[in-house]
Amino acid sequence: MGADISIEQARTAAELWAMNALVVVGGAVGGNDGRLGSVPIFSFIRCVDDFAQHLLVLEGASDVLPLFLGDRGDSIRAVLGADSLSRQAPVETENPFEVLR
């Protein structure tokens, strides 16, 4: 953020990550029929040194999860800025999911 990508573009990347994660995890457990829950989201945002709006980017992901998981999609979030990420990705996120019985 701040150099070669806008907040909106990075936010879209975070949204896409969340949707992809839901598809992959849902496929692994046989669908999301009320059995998936999200636990804390931890992200790195590739940004310039003086960027201070990390949470605006991560909200892209945290806004998508409740759309598919309801209240089980609300989660604690943590985000840090980084000078570089693998393959110049704007966002790198870790979000374990919980399989509810």
Image: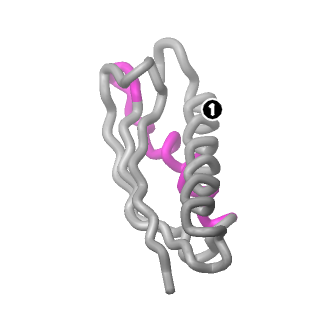
- 80 lies above or below 59: above
Q: Residue at x 63, y 79 (%)?
A: 34
Q: Find residue 91 and report its horizontal and vertical position in percent.
A: 46, 34
Position of 47 with respect to 19 (left or right) is left
- Is 35 or 12 nearer to us in this picture? 35
Residue 60 in the image, given as x and y percentages of width and height: 58, 46
Identify the residue position indicated by label 1 in the image: 8
Q: Main secondary structure of the magenta part?
A: helix
Residue 100 magenta: no
Q: Which residues are magenta?
A: 46-67
Which of the 4 image quadrants contains residue 10? top right
> As displayed, is residue 92 above or below residue 63?
above
Residue 66 highlighted magenta (yes or no):
yes
In the orientation shown, which residue stands out farthest toward the bottom? 101
Question: In percent of the image, x 67 and y 77: which residue is there?
Answer: 33
Q: Classify residue 22 by image quadrant.
A: bottom right
Task: State the residue in front, 84 or 53.
Answer: 84
In percent of width and height, residue 82 lies at 31, 28
Q: Residues within 10 Å of mark 1 (few under 14, many from 20)?
A: few
Question: Does residue 55 appear left or right of residue 78 in this picture?
Answer: right
Residue found at x 47% / y 19%: 2
Please tell me in which quadrant of the rendered image residue 64 appears: bottom right
Residue type of the residue flagged with mark 1:
Glu
Q: Is residue 91 left or right of residue 8?
A: left
SS at circle 1: helix
Q: Which residue appears farthest toward the top when viewing the image? A: 4
Total marks drawn?
Answer: 1
- Residue at x 51% of width, y 72% of height: 37
